[in-house]
Image: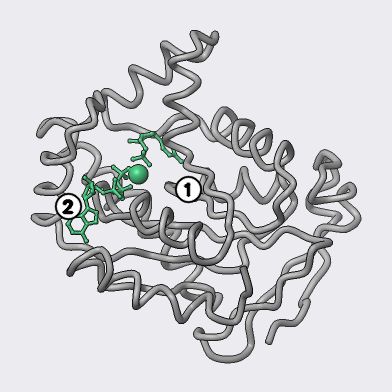
Amino acid sequence: MWRRVASVSHLFSHSKSTKFNQGASTFKIWETFTSESEIPTPSKGSPFITFVLGGPGSGKGTQCAKIVEAFGFTHVSAGDLLRREIASGSAYGSVILSTIREGKIVPSQVTVELIQKEMESNDNYKFLIDGFPRSEENRKAFEQTIGAEPDVVLFFDCPEQEMVKRVLNRNQGRVDDNIDTIKKRLEIFDELNWPVINYYSQRGKLHKINAVGTVDEIFEKVRPIFAPLSK
Ligand SMILES: Nc1ncnc2c1ncn2[C@@H]1O[C@H](COP(=O)(O)OP(=O)(O)OP(=O)(O)O)[C@@H](O)[C@H]1O
Ligand SMILES: Nc1ccn([C@H]2C[C@H](O)[C@@H](COP(=O)(O)O)O2)c(=O)n1
Ligand SMILES: [Mg+2]
């Protein structure tokens, strides 16, 4: 069960009106006041947003594919959107490429704009936002631009050694799947992602999943979280 605790429109007077936020006056903060295992009931009138967090190679993308299949979400991968932007030869492309090569985080404004476009061009109302937010700056930029908060936050908790092994075996030709970039990505994850994880934990939105085991074993831990949702 969820309750609205505050309207903070005065703090976001420069928020843009979007499909998800009819101007700043409708921006609300919600918090859970019961156990972490409950999720809010989605309605077709408003987006149901799940953020998917976890270190590099923790299995976010793999589990997102399973959630899409079982529960009818639309998968929005921040990393895929950025890679698509590079491939399109856009003005931002070279900056994004060098940032990804260095294992760093692309400025939030760029990533949030890509996520917003993707969400707005999709008729579905259930979204998995994979690999986002990677930092407090990412998180705040999303709230401010989209004017919404996640309903659910998944965190795939995986030991470093296992993540490194998975990434080095991935074999998808990614420029960041090499040992030097992985080390940097793990450092950045430790430095910037934990504050985000703690933020959502404190708000009772975080579902921490032990990401060790087979893909199916891990999905059986994810499934009950979304069981109240129909496809
Ligand atoms: N439970 C698992 N056991 C073994 N290998 C796995 C498991 N889950 C995913 N993998 C494999 O590990 C690699 C990384 O998985 P995936 O791409 O889903 O991770 P990710 O969290 O999305 O990583 P990134 O943040 O780098 O995009 C892939 O090759 C995938 O097939
Ligand atoms: N919020 C994000 C998400 C991704 N990136 C960049 C940096 C990552 O290393 C790279 C790949 O992302 P992944 O596919 O691993 O989720 O994309 C970012 O800067 N900000
Ligand atoms: Mg991924």
Q: How many marks?
A: 2
Q: Is residue 188 above or below residue 151?
A: above
> Which residue occupies the foreground of this view, 37 or 220?
220
Q: In this view, does 39 lie to the left or right of 47?
A: left
What residue is drawn where x is 57% and y is 28%?
A: 110
Q: Does the residue labelled 1 lie within 8 Å of ligand 2?
A: yes
Please name the residue shown 82% across and 45% down the image: 19
User: Along the horizontal axis of the image, is 131 left or right of 22?
Assistant: left
- CA gap, disc 2 to disc 1? 18 Å
Up the image or down, 115 lies above or below 189; here it is above
Q: Could you say which disc has been placed on residue 163 in the image?
A: 2
In the rendered structure, the answer to whether residue 22 lies left or right of residue 224 reads right
Indicate the quadrant of ligand 2 in the picture: top left
Q: Is mark 2 within 8 Å of ligand 1?
A: yes
Disc ID at residue 132: 1
Question: Above or below — where is 83 with respect to 95?
Answer: below
Q: Picture coordinates of residue 116 (x, y %)?
A: 67, 38
